[in-house]
Every structure is written in structure tokens, then in C-alpha cells.
Amino acid sequence: MPLEGKVAVVTGSSRGIGRSIALELGQNGASVVINYNQNEEAAKEVAAKIISTGSKAKIFKADVSKFNEAQDLIQYAIKEFEDLHILVNNAGTTRDGLIMTMSERDWDFVIETNLKSTFNCSRAAVRHMLRRRYGRIITITSVSGQMGNAGQTNYSASKAGQIGFTKALAREVASRNITVNAVAPGFIETDLTGSLPEDLKAELTDLIPLGRVGKPEEIAKAVAYLASDDAAYMTGHVLTLDGGMAMF
Ligand code: NAP
């Protein structure tokens, strides 16, 4: 149990990639706070699954794009489990559209949900991690933040912002034994991508050398590695899992 005794917060873990990350960390022995915004029943189901494996889990509702709610989430984890070792900034969304028609509201919504939430939660977690001289911060960015994606200026900007944030924070806190890394998934089958038209999905899959979309569980394994002591010498890194789509 490589994460036994560790406490983790996973933002947006009621569904999709976050759900798989919460389950993986729980299976590795961590106590997990499952954060959700709207889907309480789904969050409860994730918690029940973790508890059934013998680890501890709690759920907490917070819109992490809101500064105060993100602080409350981190404080809740520290109060319930008396510590915090791992923060996974996973909550994210899309509001796609070409720049000429993209509304200010859709721009702000995506930047706040994806990027501001990363600042909100990391700031609160770092205060605790600095004191205890240990921490793992892992942010789920995207290959869209590395390559750019037409129709996603807001999303690509938020994801590129998370990469800059990761590298800057890694330098700030390295001397206190806190590592800060990012995972960049390619095309993963979740609710977020499930609504794309079938012909676009097929077109995107054709761009993937491994010839298939990724699974949330495959992203979760990479996060569990970055959260473990095996990754103690890795910081400021972006780990891309995209079936070979980008190859930088
Ligand atoms: P998803 O299936 O749509 O799930 C999104 C999760 O985020 C849900 O649990 C949702 O909670 C939560 N969430 C959304 N807004 C939130 C907020 N303001 N506060 C708290 N929680 C919030 O998405 P996904 O595909 O798993 O994506 C997860 C992350 O991976 C995102 O950062 C995304 O950008 C990134 N990513 C995904 C792909 C992909 O192909 N799927 C590729 C690259 C990167 P509720 O349901 O409770 O509201």
C-alpha cells in the first residue's frame, strides 16, 4: 500500500478522470476527500467504493472556482483526516467555440473553473504542506494546452496556464520537499468528450498512433505514481498520456 497514511484531496472526483484518480489513490491506501460540485449521489458512490476497499473516504461539495469554497474544501480535509499530503487539481470543463463567437461569459467560466480553481486549491494546500515540509500537488492539464486546439482558445489557454503555474510553483516550494507536477491527457473517454459528434471522435482517434482513445484508469495510474515516494525526484514535470498524439 504505497499511499498508506497519506491524505488526498481530488477536485471534481464525482465523475470521469477525477473519479478514477480518487479510486486509484484509495486502492493504494490513501484517505481521500472526494470533491463534487453538482453530483452528490455520484460522489457518494465513489466514497462507498473506496471504503469497501478498506480505505477512508469523505465527500465535500465545493465549487472550486470560488476562492472561499476551495479554502473550505482544503480545511475540511485537514480537519477530518488531520493532515494533507496530496492535492489533485482535476476539476475542469469546456465551453467550445470559435473566437469570433465565443462569449466573454464562456471565456471567464472556463478560465475560472480550470485555472483559477488550481490557484485556489493549491494556495490553501501549500500553506499546510509548507509547515509539514511534505506535499504532492498534481494538476490535470491537457495536450490542448501544449498543442492548442481550434475552437478551444479558452480551454487551451486555461490548460497552458496550468502548466506555467505548475513550473512556477515547483520552483517556489521545492526546498520544502513539495513536488508539483502536471499530467496531460490526450483524448480520454468521459462525459466531457462523450457528447462530441461520432465523426469528430473518429477523426481524433485517427490522429492517435496507438489507435484508440485513453481510459480514465490509465490517467489515474500516472497520478498515483506522481503521488508516491517513487516520484520523489520529479518536479515541474508534465507527463503526457495521449497514445502518442502530440509527441513533443
Ligand atoms: P468530466 O467527466 O466532465 O468530469 C468533470 C468533473 O469535474 C466532475 O466530477 C464535476 O463535478 C467536476 N467539476 C466541474 N466543475 C467543477 C467545479 N467548479 N468545482 C468542483 N468540481 C467541478 O471531465 P473529465 O473528462 O473527467 O475531465 C477531468 C479533467 O481532465 C479536466 O481538468 C479536463 O480538462 C482534463 N482532461 C480531460 C480530457 C478528456 O479527454 N476527457 C483530456 C485532457 C484533459 P460534478 O459532476 O459534481 O459537478
Image (tube, rainbow, N blue to C red):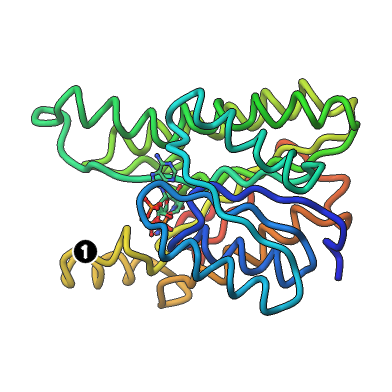
Q: Residue furthest front?
A: 80
Q: Find residue 193 and report its horizontal and vertical position in percent.
A: 30, 61
Q: Nearer the viewer, residue 122 or 172?
A: 122
Q: Find residue 64 and report its horizontal and vertical position in percent.
A: 47, 35
What residue is drawn where x is 77% and y is 51%?
Answer: 7
What residue is drawn where x is 71% and y is 50%?
Answer: 8
Q: How many marks?
A: 1
Q: Nearer the viewer, residue 211 or 85?
A: 85
Q: Left or right: where does residue 3 sit relative to residue 116?
A: right
Residue named by callout 1: 195
Q: Nearer the viewer, residue 227 or 71?
A: 71
245 w.r.t. 75: above or below = below
Q: Find residue 56 and report its horizontal and vertical position in percent.
A: 72, 63
Q: Left or right: where does residue 179 sit relative to residue 165?
A: right
What residue is drawn where x is 67% and y is 79%?
Answer: 52
Q: Could you say which quadrant of the image residue 54 lies in?
A: bottom right
How crowded pointer 1 is (Cα within 10 Å; few <14, some 14-19, many 20+) is rated as few
What residue is drawn where x is 43% and y is 62%?
Answer: 15
Q: Could you say which quadrant of the image residue 128 lies in?
A: top right
